[in-house]
Image (spheres, grey):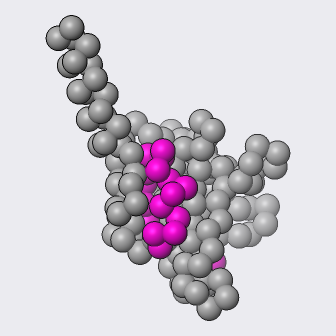
C-alpha cells in the first residue's frame, strides 16, 4: 500500500512539473534532446538559398499570448527563443515541442496587425556532424506528408 501511495505521489509530481497550465508556460531543457541542444545558430539551404538564425531566449515564453496555451497543456517545451529569417529584422518567438513523437517547432508572427496573432509550425530534426560546422538541419511541414529541406550550419 505504501508503495502505491509513493508511486501516485511521484506520478502527480511529474505531471505537475512537466505539464503546462493556463497561467504559465514551463521550459524543460534536456541536453540529450538533439534538436534542443543544437538548433541555435545560423542555417542556410544550399538548394534554395533561404537562411535563418535561431537564438535561445526563454523569456519568449512570457510573450506568447495565452490563447495558445491550451494547445500546449500536454506538451513539454524543450527549447525557446527567437527565429530571424533572412532579410527580415523581426525576431519571431518560437518554442520546440514534441508532436506525435517528432521534434516540432512552433513560431509566432503578426497577423492582421495583431502582434503574435498567428502560429505556424513544422517538423524538424538535426543530424549532428563530427564537428558543429558539419551539422545538418532538416525542416519539413507541419504534418508527415511533406518532404524535408536540408539546411547547413553557417556560423
Residue 80 in percent (x, y) is at 43, 60
Residue at 29% across / 43% down in the picture? 17
Residue sitting farthest toward the front: 1
For residue 60, side relative to residue 144 (left or right): left
Residue 125 drawn at (x, y percent): 61, 45
Q: Within the image, what quadrant is residue 12 found in?
A: top left
- View extreme (left): residue: 2
Quarter of the image with the N terminus in it? top left
- Say whether residue 59 is left or right of residue 105: left
Residue extending furthest toward the bottom: 113
Q: Which residue is drawn at 48% across and 61% down?
A: 69
- Residue 144 visible in the snapshot: yes
Is residue 92 located in the magenta-colored stretch of the structure? Answer: no
The residue at the point 17 percent across, 11 percent down is: 2
| Highlighted range, magenta | 65-86
Residue 135 spot, x, y in % from top left:
56, 48
Amino acid at each position: 500500500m505504501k508503495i502505491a501511495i509513493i508511486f501516485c505521489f511521484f506520478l502527480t509530481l511529474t505531471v505537475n512539473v512537466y505539464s503546462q497550465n493556463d497561467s504559465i508556460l514551463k521550459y524543460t531543457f534536456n541536453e540529450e534532446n538533439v534538436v534542443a541542444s543544437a538548433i541555435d545558430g545560423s542555417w542556410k539551404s544550399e538548394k534554395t538559398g533561404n537562411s535563418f538564425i535561431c537564438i535561445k531566449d526563454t523569456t519568449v515564453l512570457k510573450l506568447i499570448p495565452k490563447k495558445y496555451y491550451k494547445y500546449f497543456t500536454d506538451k513539454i517545451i524543450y527549447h525557446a527563443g527567437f527565429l530571424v529569417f533572412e532579410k527580415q529584422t523581426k525576431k519571431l518567438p518560437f518554442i520546440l515541442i514534441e508532436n506525435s513523437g517528432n521534434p516540432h517547432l512552433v513560431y509566432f508572427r503578426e497577423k492582421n496587425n495583431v502582434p503574435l496573432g498567428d502560429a505556424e509550425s513544422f517538423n524538424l530534426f538535426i543530424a549532428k556532424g563530427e564537428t558543429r560546422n558539419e551539422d545538418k538541419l532538416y525542416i519539413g511541414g507541419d504534418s508527415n506528408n511533406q518532404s524535408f529541406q536540408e539546411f547547413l550550419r553557417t556560423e
